[in-house]
Image (cartoon, helix red, strand yellow):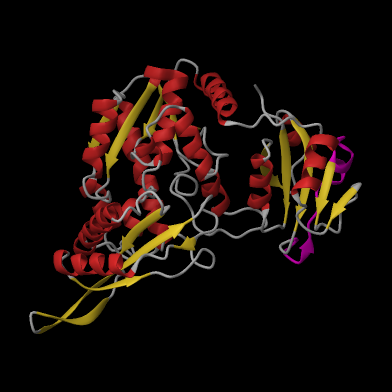
Amino acid sequence: MKQDMIVILDLGSTENTVLARQLRHMGVYSEIHPHDITVEELKALENVKGIILNGGENRVVDGSPIDVKEELYACGYPMLSIDHPGAKCEKQLDALPDEAAMREFIFTDCQAQANWNMKNFIADQVELVRRQVGDKKVLLALSGGVDSSVVAALLLKAIGPQLVCVHVNHGLMRKNESESVVEVFQNQLHANLIYVDASERFLDKLAGVADPEQKRKIIGSEFIRVFEEEARKLDGIEFLGQGTIYPDIIESGTKTAKMVKSHHNVGGLPEDLQFALVEPLKQLFKDEVRACGLELGLPEGMVYRQPFPGPGLGVRCLGAITRDRLEAVRESDAILREEFQKAGLDQSVWQYFTVVPDFRSVGMKNHARVFEYMVIIRAINTIDAMTATVEKVDWDVLEKITNRILAEVEHVNRVCYDMSPKPPATIEFE
């Protein structure tokens, strides 16, 4: 069943995602589109029932106020204007409406149906994937994280044996991560899984590279190269499956908001990409991805697995990657995860990890002066990955984790706890 849609046009608001989530919470699908969308592009979207012009503090771009195209006002859809002084609509508001006002607009004015749910979403995506792929094969990067696992399950439902999963060990995985991926997906779920150990290849490419954006782009591009090499060994591969989700797209920049960071599956793709992309989760927020995974029958332990960025520990070994700091990140992260599980925090804290900066601090070990690295612990809570609060971890738990890291991880003499929410900080350091 096709979901009715309310289109949100970005006219400079910083709360587009808040509004989109409010609509979806009411059972009505919503998408955010640029302010300069054409009438033809709008009509090409399926089941549009209404438009919200969402203005805000970024409504002036390059010195000029922005507005929708003039012909859009006469396209026949019900419109609601929020904080947009240039609007010519019947309904204008100065701020986000309360639930009662929003319900009146979407259900009375727009006559939209509350048919946005995961069962309908999955049915739609299965149909779209089958239509897009036909009888060809899809190559999927299967990291074992939440996003790639849900994509794999959805594509297996849609095209079954036409899906070829590739797990690339880029040398930036968490401790025992690759072994776990092979065990779960190949041995338990019986997916068509190809394992590639490319750790030395990635680390050689990243040697001496300190800029975070350059690291992400190198990792993203090298991933594609590995897939291309694997695809040449197979027949009928024309598509690349990706676990792109909505925050990835939003944080990679819009026409009225600056880029926060490029994501390996948004900004790091080479221009000469040989595949067409299959991205069935690209309009979902993180909590919706998990709901989708549960609806597809994935076990809770997999759906609520710790989030892990595509570039892996490459963006947690800050600055130019060195093998000693990379190992310090890997070992300290394993200790953190083990102690959080013992303390019962593994299910209540949304994301937690360690990072190691590329500078040293003075310390004392065995009655001698040492000059070693520090480990920074980050633990945050969030719903949609767009904002985040810091977890107030019990002092005894932090002390135990600190003592273990200092005793068990080589080249480390200091442990710190990151108290920064998002914003102004981001979840990851790079």
Place of residue 203 in the rendered image (x, y in percent of width and height, measured from the top left):
25, 53
Q: How many marks?
A: 0
Residue sitting farthest toward the left: 366
From the viewer's perspective, is 417 left or right of 289?
A: left
From the viewer's perspective, is 58 left or right of 278?
A: right
Q: Quadrant of residue 44?
A: top right
In the rendered image, which quarter contains the C terminus? Answer: bottom left
Place of residue 2 in the rendered image (x, y in percent of width and height, measured from the top left):
66, 24
Q: Is residue 171 above or below residue 149?
A: below
Q: Is residue 342 magenta?
A: no
Place of residue 190 in the rendered image (x, y in percent of width and height, measured from the top left):
28, 23
Residue drawn at x 73%, y 38% is: 6
Residue drawn at x 43%, y 48% is: 264
Q: Is residue 397 above or below residue 124?
A: below
Residue sitting farthest toward the top: 135
Q: Is residue 273 above or below residue 347?
A: above
Residue drawn at x 73%, y 28% is: 47
Tell me where the magenta segment starts and ends, as one range: 59-78
Q: Quadrant of residue 255?
A: bottom right
Q: Is residue 77 visible?
A: no
From the viewer's perspective, is 104 left or right of 244?
A: right
In the rendered image, which quarter contains the N terminus? Answer: top right
Q: Is residue 74 magenta?
A: yes
Q: Nearer the viewer, residue 374 or 214?
A: 374
Q: Nearer the viewer, residue 341 or 170?
A: 341
Q: Is residue 227 above or below residue 2?
A: below
From the viewer's perspective, is 123 left or right of 30?
A: left
